[in-house]
Amino acid sequence: MVELLDTLYSNKTLLIILTLLVGIALGLFAIRPLLSALRRRAMRERRNYLAILLNSFKRASLVLGVLGVLNMLLILPVDLPWNKGYRLTVSVLNTLALTFITAELLIFIYEKYTARRIDSKVSTLFHIIIRLLVYSAGILMVSSIVDYDIKAMLTALGVGGLAIALALQDTLSNLFAGLQILASKQLKPGDYVRVDDQVEGYVIDINWRNTTLRTLQENVIIVSNTQLSQSITINFFTLQKNLYFKIAVGVHYDSDLDHVERVTLEVAEQVLEQFPDVPRDFHPKVRFNEFADSSINFHVWMATDLYENRMIIQHHFIKALHKRYNQEGISIPYPIRSVYIEKSE
């Protein structure tokens, strides 16, 4: 057996091919099915973040399988004619794999912490920063393993730092603007915002360059972080997730306003009961506000947890209110102007 291994080890090309095949088989038929089973169990138990972590490792299952076989070869009792270079290569690969695992674990811990403390979706900008820091540390460790002069590399980066900063000025501006937006905690994924009274939608993601919004029409709007940080932005979910809105109504001057208010509130309550996303402790309000040219105007205040429900609630309310007003004999007047013409003698 030992002689067979000696013969195999002496043929470098054959050994590399065989190692890759065994590693790929191990990754496909052992590691990947195991991670898939663990991921399905995590999904059944509603442990979504653990499922995401296992899915990340599943994507690297082939690499982990090959790396496992390469490490197993080191413990076999056979001297390799190219042992030093082989051990160095495996050490580098182990460091890179450890770097990947560390980055994914830190992202997993961060997402769990954020979900527990903030109860919100997580921006991918922090994912990028975590990976950048961990991968940079991994590169420095690899440089140390291969005896590369780290001081020379750091010196070169210091000298070229100014040129890089000038070349990436816009990118760095967007990066720091994104960090400022997230650090202020005034805007986060899941919020509904309006930017400069021009565009509005749900924040999908804040990454290193731009912020992505999803409109109610299922369109995607991309706004650079710099532009967003310099704009007047309305966040409808900053203080609370409930969204309050008003609907304008007008009735005839001959109407009994107490009766109008009572009927309007009854209709509003009936409409809101049809929507489960309405805050249960909210009650609609009527506020008269204007003696207009042909009507007494007022606003009906309503609420919802989902911004997209605003229009459908308004739609059902107007239909129901118009029908009820007709039944109660409450008149919604047409705009009327009286014109007096004096005849000249």
Image (cartoon, helix red, strand yellow):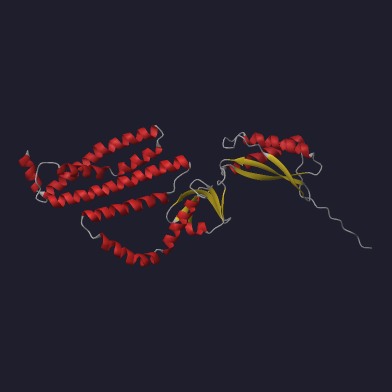
Q: Can residue 221 be seen here?
A: no
- Residue 121: % across, % down: 46, 44
Q: In screen coordinates, is 75 left or right of 237?
A: left
Report the residue that reaches farthest toward the front.
151
Which residue is at a point 39% across and 32% down the rendered structure image?
Answer: 44
Q: Can residue 261 be seen here?
A: yes
From the viewer's side, name the closer residue of 258 and 140: 140
- Residue 160: % across, % down: 33, 66
Which residue is at a point 62% across and 43% down the rendered structure image?
Answer: 244
Quarter of the view holding residue 58: top left
Which residue is at a point 19% across and 43% down the rendered structure image?
Answer: 71
Report the residue that reaches farthest toward the left.
3
- Residue 42: % across, % down: 37, 34
Q: How many labels, in total?
A: 0
Q: In screen coordinates, is 29 left or right of 2?
A: right
Q: In screen coordinates, is 342 left or right of 35?
A: right
- Residue 168: % across, % down: 40, 63
Q: In screen coordinates, is 254 left or right of 36?
A: right
Quarter of the image with the C terminus is bottom right
From the viewer's side, name the closer residue of 11 and 180: 180
Q: From the viewer's perspective, is residue 44 above or below residue 300?
A: above
From the viewer's side, name the closer residue of 145 and 195: 145
Quarter of the image with the N terminus is top left
From the viewer's side, name the closer residue of 145 and 176: 145
